[in-house]
Image (tube, rainbow, N blue to C red):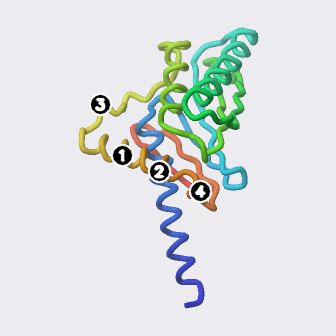
Amino acid sequence: MFGFKSQSRSKAEEKAGIQFLAALLVCYPEISSVTYDPKKTALTFDFVVRGSYPEKELNAFTKFLSESVETYHALTDGSHVYLAVRGEEIVAENRTVMFHVDRDIRSLDRGELTLLARLFTEHFGKALLVDSHSLKSLEQDFASVQSELLDQMLGQARELHFRMHMVGLREGDRVVVYNR
């Protein structure tokens, strides 16, 4: 009676959060990592692009990406959504650009995720870091379960209240989710 309910609810919530982030990464191999911030109830998707690009081109792409998502939502559900896109050039042995897309979880849907992945793929082509384990290359049953799970979780996004800060990332041929 003293805390057992909240502990079991907490465990179920933790498991659901882990499954949600893992399903996002499995279904969208273009996303390198995803972070959930419980204070903002927002996700940050990271897309990694190999190479060096002029700042003007990166700014034009981030503006295009923001406008595309705003237009998508205006046409599909008439809503205005919170979206922030920023690029970060990483100067190392191999130059890369990491795009961080911040998005409120409550109005996120599958069509928007597909749009984001498609826009990155079409703009950057082979320079976009994409995991070789896409839904098409995975065992059919596993891919179907992950896709259905993601659809279900996105459908319940307004009720999702994960209390922990979580990070999901790709590690070799696995998806790893942990809390911070």
Read off the residue under disc 3: 137
Q: Residue at x 55, y 12 (%)?
A: 123
Query: Is residue 63 left or right of 117 when viewed as pictured?
Result: right
Residue 33 image point, x, y percent: 55, 38
Which residue is at the front of the view, 165 or 93?
165
The residue indicated by pointer 4 is 179
Q: Is residue 19 above or below residue 136?
A: below
Task: State which tag comes first along the sequence, 1 or 3.
Answer: 3
- Location of mark 2 (residue): 153
Q: Position of residue 108 (x, y in %)?
A: 57, 40
Residue shown at the point (71%, 32%) measured from the top left? 84
| Local crowd size for mark 4, using a 10 Å CA cut-off: few (<14), some (14–19), many (≥20) | few
Label 3 environment density (alpha carbons within 10 Å; few <14, some 14–19, many ≥20): few
Q: Spatial distance from mark 4 to mark 3, Cα to Cα?
A: 28 Å
Of the numbered discs 4 and 3, the one sitting upstream in the chain is 3
Tell me how far mark 1 sits from mark 2, CA to CA. 9 Å
- Residue 148's tag is 1
Helix, strand or loop at label 3? It is: loop
> Residue 68 location, x and y as percent?
62, 21
Q: Quadrant of the image for the C terminus?
A: bottom right
Foreground of the two, 28 or 154: 154
Q: Earlier in the sequence, mark 4 or mark 1?
A: 1
Q: Name, please, the residue furthest toward the left.
A: 140
The answer to which image quadrant residue 132 occupies is top left
Q: Would residue 62 appear left or right of 134 to someone viewing this image? A: right
Say which amino acid is labelled 2. Met
